[in-house]
Structures are given as C-alpha cells and as structure tokens.
Image (cartoon, coloured by chain):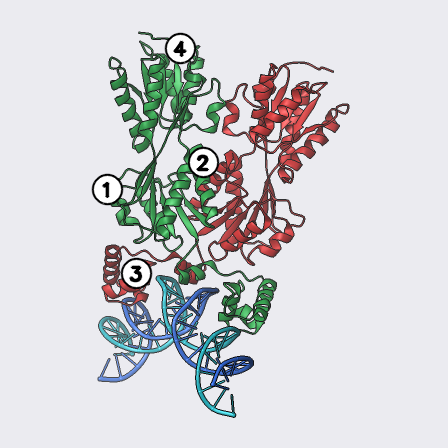
Chain colours: A green, B red, C blue, D cyan
Amino acid sequence: MGVTIKDVAREAKVSVASVSRALNGGSGVTAETMERVREVAARLRYIPHGAARSLITRRTHTIGALLPDLYGEFFSELIRGIDLAARTHGLQLLVSSSHDGAAEAATAMHAMQGRVDGLLVMSPHADAAFLRQNLPVGLPTVLMNTVLDRDDYPALSVDNGGGARLVVEHLIDAGYRRIAFIQGPAKNHDVAEREQAYRDTLAKRAPGSEAIVLPGDFNEESGYRAGRQLVAMHPRPDAVFAANDMMAIGCMAAIREAGLRIPEDIAVAGFDDVPMARYVSPALTTVGVRIAELGKAALEQLMTQIEGRHDGTPPAHIRMPADLMIRASSTNERSRKT
Amino acid sequence: MGVTIKDVAREAKVSVASVSRALNGGSGVTAETMERVREVAARLRYIPHGAARSLITRRTHTIGALLPDLYGEFFSELIRGIDLAARTHGLQLLVSSSHDGAAEAATAMHAMQGRVDGLLVMSPHADAAFLRQNLPVGLPTVLMNTVLDRDDYPALSVDNGGGARLVVEHLIDAGYRRIAFIQGPAKNHDVAEREQAYRDTLAKRAPGSEAIVLPGDFNEESGYRAGRQLVAMHPRPDAVFAANDMMAIGCMAAIREAGLRIPEDIAVAGFDDVPMARYVSPALTTVGVRIAELGKAALEQLMTQIEGRHDGTPPAHIRMPADLMIRASSTNERSRKT
DNA sequence: AGCTCGGATGAAAACGTTTACGTTCGGCTC
DNA sequence: GAGCCGAACGTAAACGTTTTCATCCGAGCT
C-alpha cells in the first residue's frame, strides 16, 4: 500500500542502500545522487516505515507512559510535563491508562515491548514483584509515585509527608485544634503517606487533640459527603484537611450550605494546588506539588538511563518538594481557642 | 538483549513457527506442545517484539493523536474521551503535541508512519494542501476541529457557531444590549467561528447595538486584561462573552476588582464548560461542548475507516452539538434597558 | 497391504529498513 | 604506465516476527 524504499530506489535508479544513505546522514553518496534521491523521495511522498526502521536500529524515539488514569488536573499536568521534556529530546509519547486490574496493567506493559525506548510507570499495581514479572527485561524504567520495598528502579515521588506536615502545622499555628482529615482511595499510597503525616504531626504538635478521619475517594462528591458529616459532628471540627483539592472544594460547598463561614467557622485545606484552587472563594489553601516538574524530572532520569550513563550509583529515589500555598480558606487571624 | 522467539523455540525444542502458533491462536499445535511452549515462554519472560510483529502483520493496535497542545481542560478532556474509546477497542495511544510550526507538525506526522493504524488530527496547520502533502498515503485519518475546503477526510468539530449564537441570544433575551466579545488566538478557527456567530447574532437580534471586540489569547491573564479595558469604557458594556472559560474567569476577576457586580453591572459568559466554571462565584454561564464525546466519536469514525467499512458514502463531517449552560453569571432578572 | 487424508511440524520467505562488506572506478603517486 | 587508495555504490545479511508451503507421520479406508 504505502510507498517503500524500494520504490524510491527503482525510480531514482540506485540501490536501496544509497537511498538510505542519501536520506539519512548523507555521507557516502555524491551530492548529485543525494539530490536526485531526495527529489524522488519527495515526489513519491516516501516516508520511512517506523516499525521497520526501529526493528533494526533498536531505537524507537518513543517513550511509554503507564498511568492509572488520564482524568483530572493531576494527570493533565503530569503528561504535560512529560511531553514538554520529551519533545526537547525529540521523543514521542505512547500513553496507556486506566488499568483497573493488574492483568490489564501487565497487558499494557507487554504492548510496549519493542515500541518504546523506555518506560515511565505510575501504577497502583506496581509493586516490586509485579514489575519484576512483567517489565520487559532490559527496558529502562523510571517509577513515579510508587511504593517500592527495594531500590531496583529509580523512582520519583511527591513529598506527601512533608506537604501534609506543612498543612497541619500551618493550621495548628493559625489556632485550629480540632482538625479533620478526608481520606482518598483506600489503596492509594500517596494518600496513606498524607494521612500518616497528618496523624504524626497532630500528635506531635497538638498533643491533646485527636485525629478525626473521614472516608473519601478523591472525587468532589465524596468531599461533599464528608463535609455533611463534618458539620453535624459534636463537637464540630474547626478545620478540615482533604487529601486532595477536589474533595476540599466539595467539602467547602457542604460547609457553605450548612450556613457556616470559611475560615471563621471551619478552615479548609487541600492537596495538589489544581488551577481551580485559587479561583474558588475563598481561595483554597493547599499544597503545590509541581506535577509538571515531576514528569519532566522523571523523563530526564529515564533519558540518562537510556543513554547508558549509569554511573554505577544505585538508582536514585527523588522526592519532589511540596510547597504550602496559604490562601484565604485558612487565614483567619484568630488566636488560640480551646 | 531481550529474549526472542528463537530463545523460546530452542528451549522448548520446537521451531519458531510452532512457538508463534502456540502463543497466538493455538491452532495447528498439539495441546501438549502448546502447554510446553507457554510454560517456557512464561519462564523466560518472553514478550513479543512489537515492531517486528507489526512489521509483518501491518497492524500496530495503536492510533496516533496529533494535538496542538496538551495543556488545560480542553485537551485533557479530549484525550480522555479518545483514550476511553481506544481502550474499548484494545488500542494504544501515541500522542504528539505542541507543534508550533508547520514543519514540526509535518515531522510529527512522519514519525507516525508505520507506528499507527490511524491518525486523529487536530492542528491549526492542517489545511487541505498540508495534509495531502504530509499525511502518509493510505493512512486512515480523521480530522478534529479543522477547517477544510474540500471533503477529503472525515471530520468532527464542535458547533462553535451554534454555541455562540445561543449565548448571545440568551444575553439579549436577558436584557443585555452592549455585549462585548473577547477573542482567542489570532489564527484559531474555532475562535473565528465563534466571533462570526457573535457578530451575526448581534446584528440580527439586536439591530441597534454594535460589536465590541477585545483581543485575547485563551489564557486567563488575557481575559483579565480585557476585563480591565472593559470596565474603563464609556459607555461601559453590560455583558461580555469570552471565547473560552479561562478568559471569562480572568475577566470576572478584573470586574470584581473594579468594584462592579456580576451579573448586575456586567454579565459574563464563556465557552467550553470546563469543570471550574461551576465553581467560580458567581457560577459561569458557558457553552458545554462535550469534548470527551467528540474524542470518542472521532475515534469511532476512525475505526470504521480502519476496518475498511467505507460504504462508498463521502466522508462525513459531523458537528458535535453545543449546549448552553445558564448559570448565575448571566441570570440577572432585569427587563429591558436602553 | 496400499492408498489417501489430515493434522502437526519445520524450513523459508516476507515485512521495510540499516549497515557490513565487496566491488568498481577514477585519480593520484611513483 | 603500473600500482594504490579512497570514494561511491551495490549485494546481502540482519532485526524478530508471521505465514505459506512442503514434509512427515499416523490413522482410516478399500
């Protein structure tokens, strides 16, 4: 169907080898034949067949990204960071998302074999055993936000613990004491780290107070439900820290509906700093995680691996710093309270 | 480096042909040898080489998506729709974005050759001549939001004109008369359609009023700048229709800063219905364009083309309906005004 | 017993490239 | 003018699969 290198060779009256030389480096051919070949190739609209080419060069100029989802600001931002970095290296992006089950994730990984030069993996199913079993051997891989018992692969992740600690410290410093926490999806490792830091910081910095934990699933609606529970509690919490921004926003809606003021009656904080966070009113205090930077850093890490510059050092595990963004939803100037 | 089919064949003491048969359909081999081959393949962690396989099968199980950008709600949503549809067909997604120039877009297209079964194209550079010149011949292609003089390729696009008309009609019906419009990027075709409909509707439904057009570039900040200009005008417009939601939101900030009320002093409307639109206050009147559905529809269209069911009918050009979402930013109950 | 038929298997071609290796040929050095 | 060297070019192998075709073998039939 398509026009191949042979067609060009025949038309230009040279061998396929010369066509290849003329179109690539250009060394080893006369300026004249190169000219002629290029002209013919353009006229015939010859475009090299990617699969055939990468079969022999062992290079695909593509990197694969395995993500749990594509929905929402977080992944949008992550992909953007990866894509931006990828195109400075002249790479394409093969994305695969929404692996609900481990089997599906495995299939996606297998499908990458021979089509990518390296893999960026963010998957809830990606424990060490799973990876060892399913990763194509010898394929450079970098993990993102993945819990790993051993340091088999380089990994990047958000400093969930540090971010959550900053939030709780900020709330305590602002005088809030009964601070609730809204969880995310059950098996999410990021959430677990945030919750742990919430509990630890609370215990350390406000010894008398107890942890108040409500369920959630990262969606706005679950934040709304948690907010409904929250306002009905006795005694009522005076601050709430949601495991992500969307739930915080849902929670704010519930608080407003109950006729309470933010932050005078209840302060609200989130996690992620999605663009929307600064537009809701009051603007949402949250943790900025520089997601695009994480994507970029992960790709750079992958590139050093692909280009074979393993300097013998064991694979690094980098934590991306998380910044506290203090906004109106928690900046009530009130002094201590019981 | 990787383990190939030959390794499996040697280890299982059969020919590569039998390995291939055992691992694929399974027909043409004894149950016993199939068992043995599968065991060996699993033990060796054999994963077929995608490029080699698709070189001969002429199938990649991948579709390419050429997008101008990945940033923001619009593309996030679009990719999600495409991805969702793709995975029901068992397809991977090869994305390529941010082609600033035509040359870059052409390179991206060429890189797809031999790596995808079909192409989804959304590009400002994609006029008919460009496509004819750069699209790999014989590669199924569907266009999205692309202006085309002839009906060479099937295409899907948002009903920009219809959506904009609904907004302007709504504003006029609500009693607004001095309605301004904030433009998007200069060469954007969607924007041009929206602006045209704005002008037409205004002329038809509110004959006395004149068009007031401010520059913008789709970013929130340009909306803010337009808002600053807007509030300083004499006479001041009493409504503003931004070519997208982010600019509308920026504009709202400028209006609020000027001490004016929305919608009492100035009504605001946007386009796209990004998730944020319902969370700003007042909630933003806008046009919902079902972006994910557009992506899904485009992919389905592409699939029928790939599977060779061209039923002789000329390629369809489908318009996705746009729904007016009336919210608080424009629902001031005021009767006519000069 | 001889024949045919069909299923399991292996050898080899094919996919479209790149590249190692020969071959040719022109020009240079002596 | 003979010999040599290097550049240009063609031939063919290689990449890892799938698939066609031929071969082999055992079972069933006459």
Q: CA distance from mark 2 to mark 1?
A: 28 Å
- Answer with left or right where residue B186 lies relative to residue B20: right
Mark 2 or 1, nearer chain start: 2
Front: mark 4 or 1:
1
Q: Quadrant of residue B30?
A: bottom left
Mark 4 or 1, nearer chain start: 1
Q: Are marks 2 and 1 in contact (CB under 8 Å)?
A: no
Q: CA distance from mark 4 to mark 3?
A: 67 Å
Q: Secondary structure at mark 3?
A: helix
Identify the chain of the residue marked 2, using the numbered disc in the image: A
Q: CA distance from mark 3 to mark 1?
A: 36 Å
Residue indicated by mark 3: B22
Q: What amino acid is at disc 4?
A: Asp
Q: Are marks 4 and 1 in contact (CB under 8 Å)?
A: no
Q: What amino acid is at disc 2?
A: Glu
- What crowding class fits label 1: few (fewer than 14 Cα within 10 Å), some (14-19), or many (20 or more)? few
Q: Secondary structure at mark 4?
A: loop
Q: What amino acid is at disc 3?
A: Ala
Residue indicated by mark 2: A77
